[in-house]
Amino acid sequence: MLTAIREVQIPLIAALVLGACSTKVLRTLRTWSIAEGLGPTALFPLRLQKPLAVTFCGIEGGLGVGLILTAGRIGHGAPADCIRLGAGLMFLVATCALLELRATRPDVGCGCFGDFSTAPVSGRTLARSALLAAAALSTLGLPAISQPKLGAETTTLLIIMLIELIVLGALSPELSEALVRLGYSEPCELRAVPAERTLAALRRSKHWRRYARIITSDTPTDVWRELCWRYAVFPAQYQGRNTDVIFAVFLQQHRPAIHVALVDVATGEPVTWPPPPPRPGDRSRRTAPRLAPGFVPRFLTAAPSAAARTDMPFSSDL
């Protein structure tokens, strides 16, 4: 029974550290911020917070992969014990850091699972970290794990894992946050999408490729947000006239809808974009796609409110 309990710790700890690393990476990709001020890194000077956050995330990912690779006969022995010792020491250091964080910065979350760990450090968080440290250290000297046989052995392992998952769930404040988010859909008006991410999605779109040959600067002259849309204005030269290419990008995570308008700078009037020449044998491209109906008049008749606009080239999440 004791050997079975020790064997369960390896896949369980590997799944936890890989999950923690993945949530941090996903948050970084979503918000373009490593959240260096979240968790024990908040105890360090500002210039060290970002490198430490990146380093700790890399250590988590490396230990998780190492625990899986050395669970069997590959790397068994000293390499496996080194990785398991490293995992135990990581949780011990994390426990001490959380104790210090709770004493000096009680308002900061542990940052263990990215956005899900924003609640202040509590006794449950400390108990979970200490329990995982003991679980990782208990695997030192464990022989290579073999595939369990169907029957009583498999049932025993599943029961042990289920009990430990229940205990970890009871010690994890992130569980309630995850359940709340599963049942909540954030309105697009409140969705936090950085301007940098919007511009990156725009530059990957076919709309950008179509107008790129007349755009004279990669830096927008104005960027602002209105409810679910972010607008970006780029200077352009078309038929010897100074024009603006105005993009409207819908604020969503993947494949946002994009509308485009070409406007004369001097008159403020929309400029007709000519259709591309048809290719030989291609009758489907006789005309170019038109701008969305009603889109240009909205640009010309409804100026953005002062609260929604910004003079900065890259606005923050408004």
Image: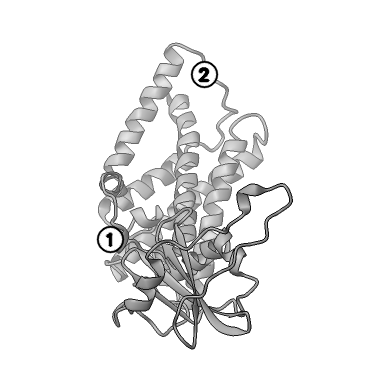
Residue 274 appearing in the image? yes
Q: Is residue 259 above or below residue 253?
A: below
Residue sitting at 38 percent across and 74 percent down? Answer: 299
Decide: marks 1, 2 in contact (CB < 8 A)?
A: no
Mark 2 belongs to which amino acid? Answer: Pro
The disc at residue 120 is: 1
x 53%, y 71%: residue: 272
Outermost residue, top side: 151
Q: Residue at x 56, y 47 (%)?
A: 63
Residue 212, image x, y percentages = 62, 70
Q: Secondary structure at mark 2?
A: loop
Q: Amino acid at mark 1?
A: Pro
Q: Secondary structure at mark 1?
A: loop
Between the C-alphas of marks 1 and 2, the distance is 40 Å
Q: Position of residue 278 (x, y in %)?
A: 68, 56
> Mark 1 Cα within 10 Å, few/some/many (few <14, many 20+)?
some
Report x, y in % for residue 286: 62, 54
Residue 283: give x, y in percent of width and height.
65, 48
Describe residue 271's horizontal placement relative to residue 212 as left or right. left
Label 2 Cα neighbours within 10 Å, binned few <14 / some 14-19 / many ≥20: few
What residue is disc 2 on?
148
Name the N-terminal-most of marks 1 and 2: 1
